[in-house]
Amino acid sequence: MEEIAARVGQNLAELRQNFSSGRTRGLEWRKTQLRAILKLVAENEDEIFEALNRDLGKHPVEAYRDEIGVVKKSAEYSLCHIEKWMAPKKGQLPLLFFPAKAEVLPEPLGVVLIFASWNFPISLALDPLIGAISAGNTVLVKPSELAPACTSFLACKIPLYLDNKAIKVVEGGSDVAEKLLELKWDKIFFTGSARVGRIIMSAAAKHLTPVTLELGGKCPIILDSLSGSDLKVAVKRISGGKWGACAGQACIGIDYVIVQRKFAPVLVELLKKCIKTLYGEEVENLKNICRIVNKNHFGRICNLLEDPSVAASIVYGGSFDKQNLFIEPTILLDPPLDAEIMTEEIFGPLLPIITLDEVEESIEFINARPKPLAIYVFTKNKTFKEKLLQETSSGSVIFNDTMIQFICDGLPFGGVGESGFGRYHGKYSFDTFSHEKAVLHRSFFLELEPRHPPWNGFKLEFIRLAYNFDYIGLLQLLLGLRRRYTSRTVH
Amino acid sequence: MALEAAELVAGLRATFGSGKTKSYEWRVSQLKAIVKLADERQKDIIGALRSDLNKPEFESYAHEISGVKKSCNLALKELHWWMTPEKAKTSSTTFPSSAEIVSEPLGVILVISTWNYPFLLSLDPVVGAISAGNTVVLKPSEIAPATSSLLSELLGEYMDSSAVKVVEGAVPETTALLEQKWDKILYTGSCEVGRIILAAAAKHLTPVILELGGKCPVVVDTNVNLEVAARRIIAGKWSSNNGQTCVAPDYVITTKAFAPKLVDALTSELEKFYGKEPLKSQDLSRIVNSSHFNRLTKLMDDEKVSGKIVHGGQCDKTNLRIAPTILLDVPEDSLIMNEEIFGPLLPIITVNKIEDSINVINAREKPLAAYLFTNDKKLKEEFIGSISAGGLCINDTTLHLAESSLPFGGVGESGMGSYHGKFSFDAFSHKKAVLRRSFAGDISARYPPYTTRKLQLLKALLNGSILGILRALFDGNQLKNVARVKAQSLTSSYYFLVEGDGLEKGFFHAAVRVGNRLNEFYLEIDTGSDLTWITCSPTNIQFLKTELEKHFTRCLQPFSTYKTPHNPYKTNNNFVSCEDSSTCGLVEKPVNPQCSKQNQQCHYQVEYADHGSSLGVLVRDIFFLSSSSKGSLIQPISTLIFGCGYHQEFSPLLRPPFADGVLGLGTGKTSILSQLSGQGLIKKVMALCLSEMDPGYLVLGDSQSNLPRIIWMPLSNNHLE
């Protein structure tokens, strides 16, 4: 324990010293590191595939789509824009302050701590890292111990490619995390559960450290009664979003579906068909689907199904392979709303379908629960779209697709309420790890006398007009044309 | 008390749930109400501030009342714009889609304010919370009781009491409030309480803005206008609530040699401002209460600083007044240098070289503000680059606060989060990402069963390499002979040389010669679009002054234009008229809503899957084509219609194309292929031969004698499925 504390303490001291030296502030350093990340993923593609396969049984295509590709795209996007992001932004100044110049200058926060999660162990470690580097910070990354192969991959490759004086990786479990949280960081970026999020934030409070919490929640999908090819596309996208991204173990993964009651049978039939083509039948023959990360989570997900009334609602799947930690894509029709499956984030391949009389009632249903990270809506009804947008609150809203908001650099990615706060991706990543420093430049000439005491009526009137930006009034006042403020005499 | 607090929050949550605070009208009405109360009750406000702090009327007006009014007026003016969803870029990976960022209110906000600017620091955050459409509880500071009770009265009287509430009280009341779940908390005050607030917020995962303080340094270089510098330091220190300001200068750093001059200047200006008996001046605030008074006198009584007082030092315990006091050369380990002073004492630290001041500042916690007086450009740059503080002000003090285009907020020990102006609106809004997709444009590679080809396609898509996408869609070997067959009569063929930086980089272009001067252009080959266009110089062009162009310049602004390999094409009064409907009507996206005049030009706009785009006008000119696969035998073949693109953009995700334009080879009527076959010159077929060594060629038409063996196949229309 002592040894851990000493090691992380030493790491932090070294990072802080290297931050103070200013080496991480230059554009060149940032670009070099970003290029190094690109090189790291490009040269080690097969090893990443292998590690993800070992930790989660992730197929290389899925691994490329959700991990390598994401990192590559983020790093390239950053490289492309970093100069523009670093440039100070000009502010507009009122004439009163003339001559002066105002600007907002982004500066690195200092030493950043990133806690990555196990479900996308490569991208959720490297994507925030890209933001922290782009903003010029030194960084300590703590990957999740629940994805050991990826963690050890990151721990051994990052020092080979990146500046190991400024970017470090610490392996370990909650003991290490605890020690890390005792130290003072300039920013903590956490991806994970709301429960741990609270612990992180409480620990950060001691040092007044700002945090970004990327949590999850039960992300609903609302499926309007579509037909024909639209319905086919929707079902395919739902199947891809639910089971195709780490077998439902994703923070923006679909948690449950809301449909109109009479529409449910159609949906169930189509989903079944879709599952069979995409993932195959029988749990032993499943392909292209990730396994559950470990026994604990496997047990947790199986437990969700144990409640007899929940078990009775299974309309497809429900079998599992304990040996290999696979769970079949499972569909449940109207499980009881007070069962754990509908009160906890599922984070696994179970898909409850909730039926309502009218699809519009979904707004009320969603609002009765904590704010999710994402709401997915498949509809062609414009009024419903706008109503839903106005009346619900969530990290993001996606119309007619699933999951793709994650790769859209123009959009901020982050939650609200129980799904977290703070945001990243693209420019937002840069902002998350930067302090926006306000800078005002003034020159020495043109000093306005009314700024200084002794105060008198003239000066008060001057300020009054100045605050209203009444320049003509000011001129009149200076020329003595305007009646002074007389409500009270001031000495 | 906890029960009361819970009921209070439940009430506000119900109001928020009803949706009434979300409307623009409600927000405006509440902002106007604040302006009204500040106008109508000005005297009461000034009176309360006199009573709490003996604040001079001038300061009350200039710092507090106008500050609040200014924030409201700015919000009233800009709110509509702030509330409009912001368009966001989408990438080729999510094509076709549109994205926007919607600002939505967070819900129920708690504002815990402080006593030094009890009116401004209470209402300024409330203005932000209301602008963003939230319900708010304001907890003013009990240390400024007159203002606290006035705020409670005024907000109850002027504002919508179902959505804006004031809770008066001290620690127990605040504790009860902090037990509730809020959607955002803004706290202004000390680090110590800041930590408590943050820890309480952690239980409910509530985001927090902390506006704390810190020791704000002022560095004074030796080359400055001493009188102006002294006045501006005084304005920020003593003329701002007698030093009881979070951004007030806390200590001064200057050189050993210059310090006496600075002290003289400060002393003489102080005397001009506050007279010989500053304790009696009505232009100076008093200390807020006796515990703060005692804290401040203790700082002066510290034996480490006794004898360091070079100006002032007088105190009046009964009236809680302390005169402006300057201390010279105080040791770094003295009490006064180890806590935020927050009062009228100004220690001066001396260094040998002014550059050393940067190390002095950086050895301490990050302050809320840092000031520098200098005329030395280098020092200025070094200071801005290496001092981390909430805000910096060069050659003045505290003025950056009055600037609503600058965010106000700290970093490190001086706090987190920021507000003022639009930043206030953003601070109390959630930026909801909204992505709209149509049901079209599904790429099978997203879905299992996964194959190697899907992996290739994904890589290409994420790389934005069009050629890579093609390669993945067709078999790598077959790509050399992608062709289209669709016509009957045999005539001849024309060749374009195709060059590029090899398959490595994926750029290929066809060389085309256009116009009487045989100017050469490199065009990207695109079978997916029809219109051919060439970057052209914007002379003689009647620019569109429509919404569309605005859209172009505003929404796509982060896209950059690129440098072309050749000089732009020059028009020669060869414009296609917008009335020529047989031609102009064929443009993929006609952008000529009102075509009135014969000489009006025909505008076009093309957008591509990779989010590149071109805006321009249609022209006619002679194309010189070669009838040999080696590119020789160039002859003027035909007058063709193409786009003269004056505004091009390409996605920043992609490398800039090394081309002057696009050679459109689609099936539509504007395509070069269709135009040539329409004139009976060629058969409507084409072939592309790419070679990794020699220049390849693109051949339009089918002339068997010239062609090597080609396997003809129809080009898939549905190429992304």
Image: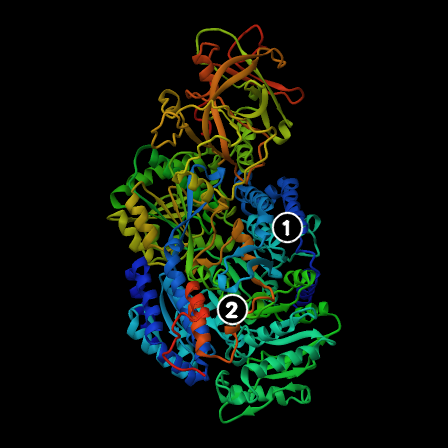
Is residue B415 left or right of A236 when viewed as pictured? right
Spot the residue most to the bottom.
B318
Residue at horizontal 41 percent and vertical 75 percent from the top: B119
- Residue assigned mark 2: A202
User: Relative to B372, is B677 above or below?
Assistant: above
Instruction: Return the residue at label 1.
Output: A154
Task: Say which quarter of the image contains residue B173.
Answer: bottom left
Q: Which amino acid does label 2 sit on?
A: Ser
Residue B368, position as x, y percentages in the image: 56, 69
Q: Residues within 10 Å of mark 2 (few under 14, many from 20)?
A: many
Q: In which quarter of the image is the C terminus of chain B?
A: top left
Q: What residue type is labelled 1?
A: Leu
Q: In this view, does B16 lie above or below B456?
A: below
The mark found on residue B174 in the picture is none
x%, y% of residue A85? 57, 51
Residue B452 or residue B681, whichever sits in front: B681
- Closer to the camera, B84 or B615? B615
